[in-house]
Amino acid sequence: MHRHALRMTAGWAVAEAVASLTFLDAWRLRARVEPEGASLRPWLQAVRGF
């Protein structure tokens, strides 16, 4: 997630903040998730609107 955020923002500090907020939101929304397939990556990327 951090690597993806870094590519999208082009700044380490901003990427750190985005990754942190993404996982915070993911934790808050975890009860609503119904995983499809083996990866939650697409859902995590959608949490922050990547």
Image: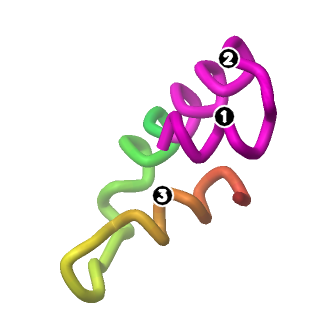
Which residue is at the front of the view, 25 or 8?
8
The foreground one among 20 and 8 is: 8
User: Which numbered disc, 1 or 3, marks the residue that appears first in the sequence?
Assistant: 1
The reply to whether the magenta stretch includes residue 11 is yes
Q: Name the residue under label 3.
A: 44
Q: Return the residue at label 2.
A: 12
Residue at x 42%, y 43% (from the top left corner) = 28
Above or below, 4 against 45 in this view is above
Amino acid residing under circle 1: Leu
**CA separation in Å, label 1 and label 2:** 6 Å
Mark 1 Cα-neighbour bin, 10 Å: few <14, some 14–19, many ≥20? some
- The quarter of the displayed image where residue 39 is located: bottom left
At 70% from the left and 12% from the top, the residue drawn is 13
Task: Point out the stretch of residues depicted in magenta.
Answer: 1-22
Q: Farthest residue toward the left?
A: 38
Q: What residue type is labelled 2?
A: Trp
Residue carrying label 1: 6
